[in-house]
Image (cartoon, rainbow, N blue to C red):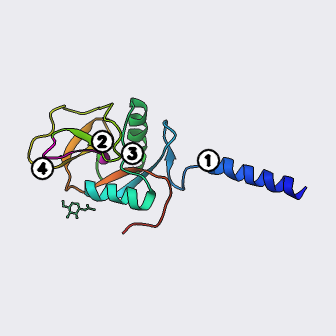
């Protein structure tokens, strides 16, 4: 009897931990857990925080559905600015888009395709009103969205 209850407990525990997202994160249409952080950093530090504290990266977007999900939730959670960081960026010397999590750049929703010029590093920011992506100088402080796999400690 004890073993039966114990197994039931273990199975329930596993089932819950497989489905649940960490506290204060939301499950996206792709099944990943997303954290919305209103107190932001430069693009590079935002991605660093996503990695170091949450085991993820700035969000990479591969479907209109996910873009919509991030846009709609950002309207409820971000108030100071319209734009927030996602993981897209372009390097001065590369002149092409990439995601910080190294996934393929297979979907895009840029406001203009030619946003990037050779005058520095740009990060991609999603506009919560239009859903469009804009290239913004990486050294800009914006709120950000991470994929979250765990929560380690609160970053300073
Ligand atoms: C981010 O870039 C700035 C310069 O733009 C640099 O001073 C800083 O060390 C970088 N931070 C990280 C975490 O890479």
Among numbered discs 4 and 2, the one appearing first in the sequence = 4
Whether residues under marks 1 and 2 lie with C-beta atoms below 8 angstroms apart, the answer is no
Mark 1 or mark 4: name the one nearer the start of the chain: 1
Q: Return the disc, 3 or 4, that comes first in the chain's sequence.
A: 3
What residue is disc 1 on? 18
Look at discs 1 and 3 and give the one toward the viewer.
1
Identified at 40% across, 50% down, the residue is: 146
Question: Looking at the image, is 42 positioned above or below residue 110?
Answer: below
Residue receiving disc 2: 126
Indicate which disc residue 74 carries: 3
Report whether 126 appears left or right of 139: right
Q: Which residue is mark 4?
A: 120
Q: Secondary structure at mark 3?
A: helix
Q: Disc 1 or 3, which lies upstream in sequence? A: 1
Q: Position of residue 117 (x, y in %)?
A: 10, 41
Mark 4 vs mark 2: give the one in front. Answer: 4
Residue displayed at 50% across by 51% down: 25
Label 1 sits on a secondary structure element that is helix
Check contact, mark 3 vs mark 2: CB within 8 A. yes
Check residue 136 in the rendering and tell me which mark sits there, or answer none.
Answer: none
**Quarter of the picture holding the N terminus:** bottom right
Q: Secondary structure at mark 2?
A: strand
Magenta span: 84-94
Whether residue 92 is in magenta: the answer is: yes
């Amino acid at each position: 009897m004890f073993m039966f209850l114990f197994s039931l407990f273990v199975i329930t525990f596993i089932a819950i931990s497989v489905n649940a997202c960490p506290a204060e994160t939301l499950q996206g249409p792709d099944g990943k857990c997303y954290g919305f952080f209103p107190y932001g950093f430069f693009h590079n530090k935002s991605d660093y925080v996503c990695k170091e504290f949450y085991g993820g990266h700035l969000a990479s977007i591969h479907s209109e559905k996910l873009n919509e999900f991030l846009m709609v939730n950002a309207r409820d959670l971000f108030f100071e600015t319209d734009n927030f960081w996602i993981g897209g960026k372009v390097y001065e010397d590369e002149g092409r888009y990439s995601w910080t999590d190294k996934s393929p750049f297979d979907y895009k929703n840029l406001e203009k395709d030619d946003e990037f010029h050779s005058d520095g590093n740009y990060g991609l920011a999603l506009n919560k009103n239009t859903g469009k992506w804009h290239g913004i100088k990486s050294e800009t402080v914006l709120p950000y969205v991470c994929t979250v796999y765990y929560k380690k400690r609160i970053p300073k």
